[in-house]
């Protein structure tokens, strides 16, 4: 989810997040807090975009992309992986019942 704020406004990391966040051990409570904060950043950032902002081009991965297309792709990835996680949780729950 961290890439979405970068796409919206060029923010590298939300305030207070380390550049090597993924390499630092975090307690469950910290991760949950950060996930909720990230969700707010993403939702507020997308709500703040107007048509001009959505149509803006940016360079990423060596090519120019329209911001709204990239955001759609990133959000689709979140939904896709959320479904995978839900499936794995269900499989685990059934296997331990």
Image (cartoon, rainbow, N blue to C red):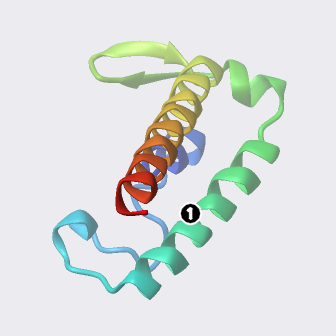
Determine which residue is flagged by label 1.
38
Q: Residue at x 53, y 23 (%)?
A: 73
Locate residue 69 relative to residue 17 in the image: left or right: right
Q: Is residue 73 above or below residue 86?
A: above
* Position in image of residue 92 (x %, y %): 37, 55
Counting labels gives 1
Residue at far left of view: 23
Locate residue 51 relative to residue 69 in the image: left or right: right
Locate residue 19 relative to residue 82 in the image: left or right: left
Q: Nearer the viewer, residue 93 or 5?
A: 93
SS assignment at label 1: helix
Q: Is residue 52 above or below residue 18?
A: above
* Position in image of residue 31 (x %, y %): 42, 76
Mark 1 crowd level (few <14, some 14–19, many ≥20, 10 Å Cα): some
Quadrant location of the C terminus in the rendered image: bottom left
Q: Residue at x 53, y 38 (%)?
A: 83
Q: Residue at x 33, y 86 (%)?
A: 27
Q: Nearer the viewer, residue 74 or 82?
A: 82
* Position in image of residue 51 (x %, y %): 82, 24
Q: Residue at x 40, y 46 (%)?
A: 88
Residue at far front of view: 97
* Position in image of residue 40 (x %, y %): 68, 63
């Amino acid at each position: 989810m961290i890439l979405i704020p970068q796409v919206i406004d060029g923010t590298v990391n939300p305030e207070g997040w380390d550049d090597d966040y993924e390499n630092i051990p975090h307690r469950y409570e910290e991760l949950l807090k950060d996930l909720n904060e990230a969700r707010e950043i993403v939702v507020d950032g997308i709500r703040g975009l107007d048509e001009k902002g959505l149509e803006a081009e940016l360079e990423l991965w060596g090519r120019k992309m329209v911001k709204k297309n990239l955001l759609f792709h990133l959000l689709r990835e979140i939904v896709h992986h959320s479904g995978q996680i839900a499936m794995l949780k269900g499989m685990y729950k059934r296997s331990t019942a």
